[in-house]
Structures are given as C-alpha cells and as structure tokens.
Image (cartoon, helix red, strand yellow):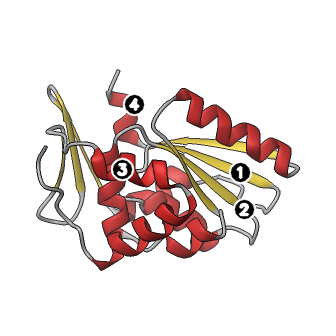
Amino acid sequence: MKKKNNLNSTYKKNITVLRELYPKLADWIEGQPDIAWAQRTPQGGLQTTYGAQTDCATMADAEAVIEGTSLHKENVTILIGMGLGHEATWILQRGERGHQVVVVEPTAHILRFAFAEHDFSRHLRTRALIIAAPGRAEVAHVLGWLESARVVEDWQLLCAPYTQRRH
C-alpha cells in the first residue's frame, strides 16, 4: 500500500473526530490504498481520469453543482461523491442550522483528499455531515437512521461530476 499523501493538520483533525464517532469508518479510510485514477492537480483541483475522460473540480465549480438546492433545516442533501469536499463545504456554510449532508463516497482516497482540504471536524461532531461509506449496507443504515431520528421534508440528491463517468 502506498503511503498516504496530504496527512496535514486539517486531515488529522477530521480523522480524529471521525475515529471518536465512527472508529471502523476511520480505520477503513486510513487502511485503503491510493488509487491511480484520482490525483491532485498543480492548481489544487481534483483530476479524475477514465479512459479519455478527465474532470477537474475546483471550489468555483461547487456553486454550479448546488444551484437550486434547498438548504432548509428540514431537508437532507445526499452528495454522491465527495471530491475535494467543496460542495459539502459550500452547503454546510450556507445551509440553515439543522440541514444535514450525507456523503456517499466508496473511495477512501477521495475522502482523504477532502479531509486534507477542508476542516469538517465541527460538522462531523454535530452530525451536520455524515459519511456513508464504503458500501450499500452503510448507506442504507445512515439513511434509515436519519429517517427515524428526525422528520425529513425533502431529500436532495446531488452527484459530483466525476461519479457520473465511472460507469
């Protein structure tokens, strides 16, 4: 397994909180190998490559992905793909208090990039941000828990552009 890059203080802060709340998830994130199809660009973006397809995501792209999303406290946003965490950060900064974000990201390497890029520790601790990974059972568990723990008026589904190219 390759040594993980970007183990900066922001990453460490996020993984420490995650380990307190969900130790198995933290172990999974740290235990998975790096992948070849996703790399950081020199400009600070995320480049994902599938054959001839290449996507670069920056913070400036986040607003376009989220446009029209209702960020009321009664709603939950489900992000398919964490990327560098720009979309999650944008929603968490602008959403009403009580709005929750569930990230479905089956690639630990991508989560490590996001955890190195943005400080999610407060949002993880308050469960404003929930990571549902790595598989279907974990996603079903998180969504079931949310539905039983609160009244959700609307579920919003957003897909990071790179996730649409993987199939």
Mark 4 vs mark 3, CA separation in Å = 22 Å
**Res 152 visible:** no
Q: Earlier in the sequence, mark 1 or mark 4?
A: 1
Mark 2 falls on what kind of element?
loop
Q: Residues within 10 Å of mark 4 (few under 14, many from 20)?
A: few
Can the viewer see residue 95 in this picture?
Answer: yes
Disc 4: which residue:
164
- Report the residue that reaches farthest toward the bottom: 9
Packing grade of label 3 (10 A; few <14, some 14-19, many >=20) is many
Q: Amino acid at mark 3?
A: Ile
Question: Which residue corresponds to mark 2?
Answer: 99
**Mark earlier in primary sequence (4, 2):** 2
Residue ID for mark 3: 29
State the separation of the CA atoms marked 1 and 4: 21 Å
Going by the numbered disc 1, the residue's amino acid type is: Val
Query: Position of 28 compared to 53: left or right?
Result: right
